[in-house]
Structure formats: C-alpha cells, structure tokens
C-alpha cells in the first residue's frame, strides 16, 4: 500500500470513542432542560420594545446666527413609526441693501 491509500483509509474509518467519556442525563435533567428551552423560546417570540432614536444639533455663526434643531423617530405599536422634527433659528444681522 502506498501512503495515499493509507491516508484515505484513515479518513474513512470512524474515530474511536474513548471509554468513560459519555455522560447520560437523567430523565429529571432532560425534563428541566426542555422546560428551560421552552421558556427561552416563549421569551424570544415576544415582541421587543423598540427604542426612540433621533438626533439634535446646534449651529452658531457670524453676525449672531444661532440655530437649534432635533428629530425623533418614535415607534408606535408594533408596526408603525412617527417621525417628529423641530427647529428654530435666529440672526441679529440686519439685511442691508446695496
């Protein structure tokens, strides 16, 4: 036999199972694990609360220019969303005619 044949044969043979390395669960342990998995599955199926997200900003410029603005994305129920934006600006600069 050549080395390739031996390597292929080694890959096809099942790996030996070591003795004493198998641990069996008792029926009570199996039941406890199944109940815990069912609780986790029910908790995962509940809709998660969606957070309110958004941004705010401020601008300051020459001539007394000031601006403040903000936007909020608000979840409404499970399937809807409301988006609210506000803003305001002020400038002390007087318009001049040239």
Image (cartoon, helix red, strand yellow):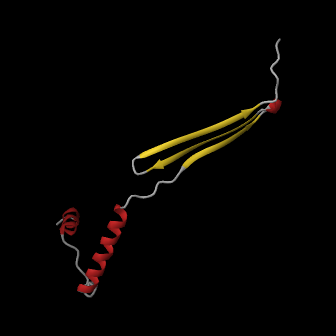
Q: Position of residue 92 (x, y in %)?
A: 82, 29
Picture layout, residue 98 above or below residue 41: above
Outermost residue to the left: 1
Q: Nearer the viewer, residue 43 or 33?
A: 43
Q: Give the quarter of the figure containing the C terminus.
A: top right
Left or right of residue 25, residue 64 in this image: right
Counting the numbered discs, the total is 0
Q: Nearer the viewer, residue 81 or 21?
A: 81
Q: Position of residue 7 (x, y in %)?
A: 23, 65
Quarter of the rendering containing residue 49 = bottom left
Say which residue appears at 29% left-offset and 76% top-offset.
35
Picture layout, residue 2 above or below residue 54: below
Q: Give the quarter of the figure containing the N terminus.
A: bottom left
Left or right of residue 20, residue 85 in this image: right
Quarter of the rendering containing residue 17 = bottom left
Q: Position of residue 40 (x, y in %)?
A: 35, 69
Q: Nearer the viewer, residue 44 or 72?
A: 72
Left or right of residue 75, residue 30 in this image: left
Q: Position of residue 88 (x, y in %)?
A: 69, 35
Left or right of residue 9, residue 41 in this image: right
Q: Nearer the viewer, residue 33 or 9?
A: 33
Picture layout, residue 10 above or below residue 80: below
Say which residue appears at 81% left-offset and 31% top-offset.
62
């Amino acid at each position: 036999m050549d080395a390739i044949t031996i390597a292929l044969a080694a890959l096809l043979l099942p790996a030996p199972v070591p003795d004493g390395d198998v641990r069996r669960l008792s029926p009570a342990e199996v039941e406890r694990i199944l109940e815990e998995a069912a609780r986790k599955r029910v908790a995962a199926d509940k809709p998660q609360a969606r957070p309110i997200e958004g941004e705010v900003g401020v601008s300051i410029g020459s001539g007394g220019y000031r601006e403040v603005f903000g936007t909020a994305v608000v979840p409404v129920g499970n399937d809807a969303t409301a988006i609210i934006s506000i803003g305001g600006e002020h400038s002390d600069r007087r318009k001049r005619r040239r």
